[in-house]
Image (cartoon, rainbow, N blue to C red):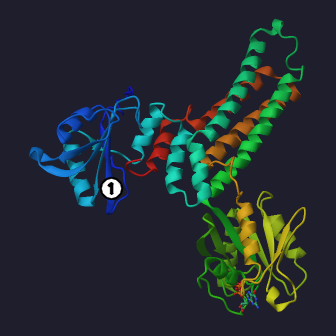
């Protein structure tokens, strides 16, 4: 339980409940000195995993609070170490007094995420699960919460493990074939490895899609509103955020600064960004505004191209924008101001684009737009196979895919068994980063320090 560098030797303590007044406040203690601290504060070591109502004592046995004490001996505890939980009254002053005494008895303040870090280091959970604890606590919607719970229960890790197992399998086969060439007829030509590799790549794609949606659920999607001046972009921002945050006038070129609003649609987080109207101009301020608009467009997860629905033509504006943004970023066309025409609100999805007719000013068609945004975020009514994920996981999946593709190339084009084996090794290592098998200490520190104290 104690690492060679001694960094788990300390006994740590922290208030585990949220700051502020509440009916219950919990102090969590973990480490070697937990038993000793229990004796000092409670006058006894509580029975393992048994609820006991006791007095929490301070200096000179003076009672500081009364509450429930729970003792979990190692290794069957949250962190894998001896853990004591003191559940007292949720007064910040009382909790502070008890915590100060716990520290005096030999514990030190826990760093953010240190309980989870110890749980990970003692094999109580893998890294993706530890991250899911933080994501569950921070989840902003039911779907995010359910997805985080599924990751916490190991659904995400399980899919990674299955894939890892398959990579290891072919890696072993390839390496054995290299070591004992006489026993394998011609493994590079018999097609089996080729098929296995494509199967793994297919599965990897599936996991990536789910993980990507998990990231959107957690971090929210960045939606940039773009289009020519006066199309109604700022009106749309105000309509979606439900407040008059951006200035709206009938003068083209009203918006110059980038305006940001954070909204939730049925609990799903969205960052909505309004930008300056795109056009040729001699005005220096407007020029700067348009430059900033392009900066935002480049970073978007989705672009809403607002056009004036009174004019029929929008194809040129769409194509120009399409040319400049990454092919993975969807551009949805919004035909605005339909309150001025006879057009009905509608969503028309063709093979390569989605066009929605709305009126930003009156709100007609906005419900259609919201449903569209939800679908774009991967919202599903019954999220049975969604899980929460982070950018870090996506990067690891991308690295794995790249290595596998390079390996495939070595196999198909060069019949280079050794180079294939090396790429498989890299793929295995990249994928293992997700569950934390091959994760360096700096990354671990970075991950856990973003948690809150007491977690
Ligand atoms: N009738 C009607 N007018 C609208 C609608 N949306 C916007 N407008 C009007 O169109 C004008 C321009 O709206 P804005 O929201 O400022 O347009 P913008 O795209 O932000 O314009 P810039 O900031 O100049 O790029 C204002 O007079 C709005 O009231 C709509 O759906 N219907
Ligand atoms: Mg505007």
In the rendered image, the quadrant that contains the N terminus is top left
Q: Which residue is drawn at 54% across and 41% down?
A: 129
Q: Which image quadrant is residue 397 in?
A: top right
Rendered position, 117 above or below 293: above
Q: In the rendered image, which residue does mark 1 sit on?
A: 24
- Mark 1 CB in 8 Å range of ligand 2? no
Q: Which image quadrant is residue 83 in?
A: top left
Q: Residue at x 77, y 25 (%)?
A: 420
Rendered position, 289 above or below 93: below
Nearer to the camera, 351 or 61: 61
The x and y percentages for residue 239 are 66, 81
Nearer to the camera, 316 or 49: 49
Nearer to the camera, 370 or 320: 370
The image quadrant where one finds ligand 1 is bottom right
Q: Residue at x 31, y 63 (%)?
A: 21
The reply to whether residue 429 is visible in this rendering is: yes
């Amino acid at each position: 339980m104690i690492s060679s560098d001694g960094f788990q030797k300390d006994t740590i303590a922290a208030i585990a409940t949220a700051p502020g007044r509440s009916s219950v406040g919990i102090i969590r203690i973990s480490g070697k000195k937990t038993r000793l601290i229990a004796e000092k504060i409670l006058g006894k070591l509580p029975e393992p995993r048994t609820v006991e109502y006791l007095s929490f004592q301070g200096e000179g046995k003076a009672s500081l609070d009364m509450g429930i004490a729970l003792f979990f001996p190692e290794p069957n505890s949250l962190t894998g170490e001896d853990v004591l939980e003191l559940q007292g009254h949720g007064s910040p002053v009382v909790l502070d007094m008890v915590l100060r005494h716990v520290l005096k008895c030999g514990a030190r303040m826990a760093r953010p995420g240190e309980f989870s870090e110890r749980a990970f280091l003692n094999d109580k959970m893998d890294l993706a699960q530890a991250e899911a604890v933080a994501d569950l606590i921070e989840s902003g919607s039911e779907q995010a919460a359910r997805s985080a719970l599924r990751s916490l229960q190991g659904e995400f890790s399980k899919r990674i493990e299955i894939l890892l197992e398959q990579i290891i399998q072919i890696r072993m086969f390839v390496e054995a074939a290299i070591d004992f060439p006489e026993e394998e007829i011609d493994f590079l030509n018999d097609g089996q490895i080729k098929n296995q590799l494509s199967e793994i790549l297919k599965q990897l794609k599936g996991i990536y899609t789910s993980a990507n949606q998990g990231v959107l659920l957690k971090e929210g999607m960045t939606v940039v509103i773009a289009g020519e001046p006066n199309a109604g972009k700022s009106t749309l921002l105000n309509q979606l955020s439900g407040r008059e945050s951006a200035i709206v006038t009938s003068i083209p070129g009203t918006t110059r600064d980038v305006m940001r609003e954070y909204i939730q649609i049925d609990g799903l987080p969205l960052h909505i960004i309004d930008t300056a109207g795109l056009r040729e101009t001699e005005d220096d301020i407007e020029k700067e505004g348009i430059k900033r608009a392009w900066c935002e467009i480049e970073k978007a997860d989705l672009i809403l191209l607002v056009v004036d629905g009174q004019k029929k033509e929008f194809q040129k504006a769409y194509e120009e924008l399409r040319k400049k943004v990454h092919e993975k970023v969807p551009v949805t066309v919004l035909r605005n101001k339909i309150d001025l025409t006879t057009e009905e609100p509608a969503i028309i999805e063709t093979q390569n684009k989605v066009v929605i007719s709305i009126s930003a000013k009156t709100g007609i068609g906005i419900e259609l737009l919201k449903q569209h945004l939800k679908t774009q975020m991967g919202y599903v009514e019954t999220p049975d196979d969604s899980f929460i994920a982070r950018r870090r996981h996506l990067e690891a999946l991308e690295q794995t895919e790249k290595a596998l593709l390079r390996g495939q190339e070595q196999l198909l084009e060069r019949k280079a068994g050794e180079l294939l084996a090396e790429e498989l090794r890299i793929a295995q290592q990249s994928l293992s980063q997700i569950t934390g098998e091959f994760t360096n200490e700096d990354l671990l520190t970075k991950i856990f320090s973003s948690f809150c104290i007491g977690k």
